[in-house]
Amino acid sequence: MVGASFACALSHGLTAADISILVVESIAPSTSPGKSPSFDARSTALSLGSSQIYSRMGLWQHLQGVATAIHEIQISDKGRFGSARITSAEQQVEALGYVIENHEIGNCLNAVLDNSAGVQFFCPAAITAITPNTAGMSLQIDMAGKSHALSAKLVVLADGGNSPICEKLGISHRRESYEQQALIANIAFEQPHKNIAFERFTDSGPLAVLPLADNNERHRGALVWTLRDNQVAEHLAASESELRARLQERFGNRLGQIQHIGERFCYPLSLSIATEQARPGLVLLGNVAHTLHPVAGQGLNLALRDAQTLVQILVEANGTTAMLGSMPVLQRYLQAQQADQDRAVNFTDYTTRLFSSNNSGKILARKFGLLAIDLVPSLRREFARQAMGI
Ligand SMILES: Cc1cc2nc3c(=O)[nH]c(=O)nc-3n(C[C@H](O)[C@H](O)[C@H](O)COP(=O)(O)OP(=O)(O)OC[C@H]3O[C@@H](n4cnc5c(N)ncnc54)[C@H](O)[C@@H]3O)c2cc1C
C-alpha cells in the first residue's frame, strides 16, 4: 500500500525522462481476501488529508467511487458516562475522512502502476539482498526462478512491519507488544450507518465500526475489534450467532440488530519504530519505519504524508546537483517529517493505553477527556484536525 502509493506519487512528480522507477512486490495480486498483505480484507479510514494527497497524485478520481464518506465520529466508553461527537458540518469540511476497502485501493494502485510511463513493476518478485555501493545500493532480486542484480541511486524500503532486509542491514526496531489483536470483519446492521464512524472503548480495548457502502441491500460496516491476546482463540472459534450476541452487547443498539458477521481475520498489535529511517541510498517508509495500533486510524495516513514529503524533497533535489539518495537530501526529509511522526505515534500510543485500561485514574481521565472534547469547541477542533490528518 505504501510502496505503491509512493511510486505513483513519484512518477506523478517527475517525468520518465528524469527518473526510472522500479517497484518490486513479492505477492501476486489476488482476488481472495487475506492473500495480499496490504490489499487484504481490511478497510482503511483515509483521512481528509490523505484523500487530498491521492487527489494531487491523480488517484482520487478512481478511488472516490468506492469511498464512503465519514460525516460524523462518535466516541463513547462502554458502560460509562462521557461521550464525544465530531461532525464534518461543524468542522466545515465535505467529510472528516473516507472508508475504502483495501482491495479497492490495491486494484487502483496496481492499475496505475501498470500504466505509468517510467515505472516498471516486477511482481511476483522478491528482493533478497540490499548492499551499499558507491552510487547508492546494489539489489538482488529473485523473479521467475532467476536471480537478477541491479543498482539504484535510492531504495525506498516499504516491506512492512516484519522486515528481514532491515535485519540483514543491521537496522533494529524498538518494539512493544500491546498484547492485543485486532479482529476484523465486515458486518451488516438492521439500520443504515448515516455515514457515522463509531469508536467505542470497552474493557478489552477499543472497538471501531466504520461506515461502508450498502451491498445487496445490506447496511454494512467494517469492524475493528481489539481483543486481549488470551481472548482471540475463543472469538475466532465462536459461532456467528454467538459472536453477534457478544458484539451486540459491546456495541449496543445504535444501528439496531447486528444481522451478519462476515469472515474474521486477526492482526497482532504492537508499536514498532525503526531506530534509523535513512542511510545513504536507503529510506524506510510505512510499517517498516513505524507500525502503529489501528485505534486512531493513523498508520497509512501518516505513511502517505511521509511519502508526499519525500516526493516533494526528491523533486526539488532533482533540479539540482544533489544526489537523490545522498544523506543531505534524506536528512531534509527526516527533519520535515519528524514532528508529524512524533505527534501521530504519541497520539496513537497514548490513546491506546488510555482507552485499554481499567485503572480507575485512567477511567476518570477518559471520562473527562471525552466530556472536554464534547464541550470545548477548540479541543474538538484540535482532535478533529488530528483525525483529518491536516
Ligand atoms: C486491523 C488494522 C486496521 C487498520 N486501519 C487503518 C486505518 O483505518 N487507517 C490507517 O491510516 N491505517 C490503518 N492501519 C494501518 C495500515 O494498514 C498500515 O499502515 C499499512 O498497511 C502499512 O502498509 P505498508 O505498505 O507499509 O506494509 P505492508 O502492508 O505490510 O506491505 C508490505 C509489502 O511489501 C512486500 N514485501 C515484503 N518483503 C518483500 C521483499 N523482500 N521483496 C518484495 N516485496 C516484499 C509485501 O508482500 C507487502 O505487499 C490498520 C492496520 C491494521 C492492522
Image (tube, helix red, strand yellow):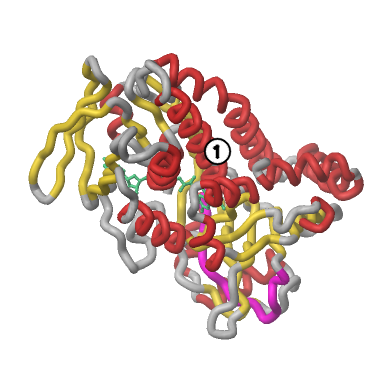
Ligand 1 contact, mark 1 (Cβ < 8 Å): no
- Image height of 72 relative to 127, above or below: below
Q: Horizontal placement of 294 versus 274: left or right?
A: right
- Front residue (pair 25, 21): 21
Q: Secondary structure at mark 1?
A: helix
Coordinates of residue 344 in the picture (x, y in percent)? 62, 35
Residue at horizontal 79 percent and vertical 44 percent from the top: 366
Residue at horizontal 36 percent and vertical 59 percent from the top: 111
The residue sitting at the left extreme is 146
Q: Which residue is mark 1?
A: 305
Coordinates of residue 269 in the picture (x, y in percent)? 50, 45
Residue 193 among those drawn in magenta: yes
- Front residue (pair 16, 257): 16
The residue sitting at the bottom extreme is 217
Can residue 9 be seen here? yes
Coordinates of residue 244 in the picture (x, y in percent)? 59, 74
Q: Horizontal placement of 15 versus 217: left or right?
A: left
Can residue 77 be seen here? no
- Image height of 249 relative to 145, above or below: below
Q: Quadrant of the C terminus?
A: top right
Residue at horizontal 34 percent and vertical 25 percent from the top: 282
- Image height of 309 relative to 30, above or below: above
Q: Label 1 sits on what residue type?
A: Arg
- Front residue (pair 179, 164): 164
- In the image, the segment drawn in magenta is 180-194
Principal secondary structure, stretch drawn in magenta: strand
Which image quadrant for residue 161?
Answer: top left
> What crowding class fits label 1: few (fewer than 14 Cα within 10 Å), some (14-19), or many (20 or more)?
many
Coordinates of residue 110 in the picture (x, y in percent)? 35, 56
Residue 260 among those drawn in magenta: no
Residue at horizontal 51 percent and vertical 33 percent from the top: 176
